[in-house]
Image (cartoon, rainbow, N blue to C red):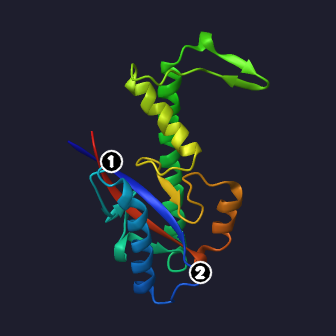
Amino acid sequence: MMKTLLLAVVCPVSGLPQNTEQVCQMVWAEVTGLLQPDLGKFYTSFYPAPRAWGMEMNVPFGVLLGRDDPVRFLHILTMAKEAQDNAAAFHLGGLLNGIDVNQAQMTGDTLVCPVQLDGTNQELEAHSLWLMGIAAGKLMPDCGVYYMQQRRAVAGPDIAKAISTNLAGYAVCTVQLEVPV
C-alpha cells in the first residue's frame, strides 16, 4: 500500500533564463537531482504534483515561478510550511509519548531526555531519527518544504524574509512522493 506526500522545493531562479519553460525544466532537473539518491530508500516514486494543497498546478513540471503568480506561490509556501509544522508536531508527540520523563535531566539550561536507539522500539527510533534529520537539514519525505539553496528543510527568518521580499527570484516545485505504508 502506498501513501502520497506533497513536497514543495524552493529554488532560486535569479540568473536563469527569462523563458518560463526553460526555467521550469532547469528547476525540475535540480529537484530530480535532489530526490534521485533517496529513491527506493524513503519513497518509491516522485513526480510533479498535478494538485498541491487544494490548488491545481497547471504549470510545467509542477514549477510555479514567484514572478508569474505571487499569490499562488505564497499560498503553496504557506501550506507547505503548515504541513511541515504538522509533521514536526506528529514526530515530537510520538517521541514524547515514548520517552521516560523520569529519566530527564537538566544540563545547564537544557532538558535532556535519554532515548535508546537499539532497535527495541522502532516507532520511537523513527520519530527520533526524523527530528534529528530535520535538525541536521536532511530532506525527509514528509517535511513539507525544502529550501534547495540552503540544503535545509527548515528556514530561518532570514531565508523567509529573503524569499518574501524577492518573489521573482524564486520558484517552488511541487512534488508528489509515493511512500510505502
Q: Which residue is more in the foreground, 57 or 160?
A: 160
Mark toward the start of the polypeptide (2 vs 1)? 2
Q: Is residue 151 visible?
A: yes
Q: Please state which of the two labelled residues, at mark 2 or mark 1, is closer to the viewer.
A: 1
Q: Which residue is at a point 41% across and 64% down the rendered structure image?
A: 174
Does 135 sit above or below residue 172?
Answer: above
Q: Which residue is at a point 40% across and 85% down the rendered structure image?
A: 21
Residue 30 percent coordinates (x, y): 44, 71
Q: Which residue is at a point 38% across and 67% down the rendered structure image?
A: 32
3D distance between C-alphas at marks 2 and 1: 32 Å
Q: Which residue is more in the foreground, 133 or 56?
A: 133
Residue 89 percent coordinates (x, y): 52, 35
Q: Name the residue under label 2.
A: 14
Instruction: Say whether marks 2 and 1 touch (CB < 8 Å).
Output: no
Residue 103 percent coordinates (x, y): 61, 12
Q: Which residue is at a point 45% across and 25% down the rendered structure image?
A: 124
Looking at the rendered structure, the secondary structure element under dot 1 is loop
Residue 75 — which label?
none
Q: Mark 1 points at which residue?
A: 41
Mark 2 is on which residue type?
Ser
